[in-house]
Amino acid sequence: ATNTIILVGMVFSLFVSAILTLLNALNREYMQQLLLWQMGSFAGRTFPQVAVLAGALVLGLVFLVRYSREMDILTFGDDASRALGVESGRVKLVLLVAVSLLTGTAVCFTGTIGFVDLISPHLVRKLFGPGHRVLLPASALFGGAFMVLADVVSRTLIAPLELPVGAVTALIGAPFFAWIYFSRASRKRAARGKGV
């Protein structure tokens, strides 16, 4: 199932990239705006747009927190979830649709800003534990604070020029991801060595 999700994600990503390339080719007068959107930016956003995003965030968080018990149970696996009365397939589908709508709403206004979804929940989980009732709102707050910090860096690092926020988060997130991956791999090797 995990391999299928990764494969579908890669195919969909390549398909969307092809559409964006086609839009760039057909609308050369908007090429700079499209390029900024692809790299992620908060430049030129207005208060009505912020209000739409804030409304989507509040509604999304309230909806997702209602499923915090189910998410906690799902961490034990599908068999254990079914044994505890959680329809894992239906819950996963509902959560996938809800998260896709929230992500799509954010991306419409800000463009593609990567690594926030990796950094925020990982650090918040270390601080507050795995319970989703706390993890979800804390991740939203931490992610928002991280975005404000990234935006400040993007506007001041090479002022008066402004870097895309997505570039700043990628510069921070890529090493962070590498650190998580390699530290986890080294812990697994150490555990296997102790088991021998």
Image: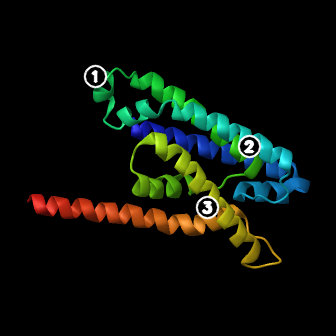
Q: Is residue 127 visible?
A: yes
Seen in the image, is 47 located left or right of residue 62?
A: right
Where disc 1 sits, the SS reads: helix
Task: Give the residue number, with chain letter if any, for mark 3.
Answer: 146
Residue sitting at x 72%, y 55%:
38
Q: Which residue is mark 2?
A: 53
Helix, strand or loop for disc 2: helix
User: What kind of residue is marked 2?
Assistant: Leu
**Does residue 190 appear to the left or right of 181 in the view shown?**
left
Q: Quadrant of residue 194?
A: bottom left
Residue extending farthest to the right is 29
Residue depicted at x 54% and y 50%? 139
Tag 2 and tag 3, C-beta contact below 8 Å: no
- Specify which label sits upstream in the sequence, 1 or 3: 1
Q: Residue at x 38, y 61 (%)?
A: 181
Number of the label disc, if any, that sits on residue 83: 1
Q: Is residue 101 visible?
A: no
Q: Position of residue 133 (x, y in %)?
A: 47, 40
Quadrant of image for the C terminus: bottom left
Closer to us: 15 or 73: 73
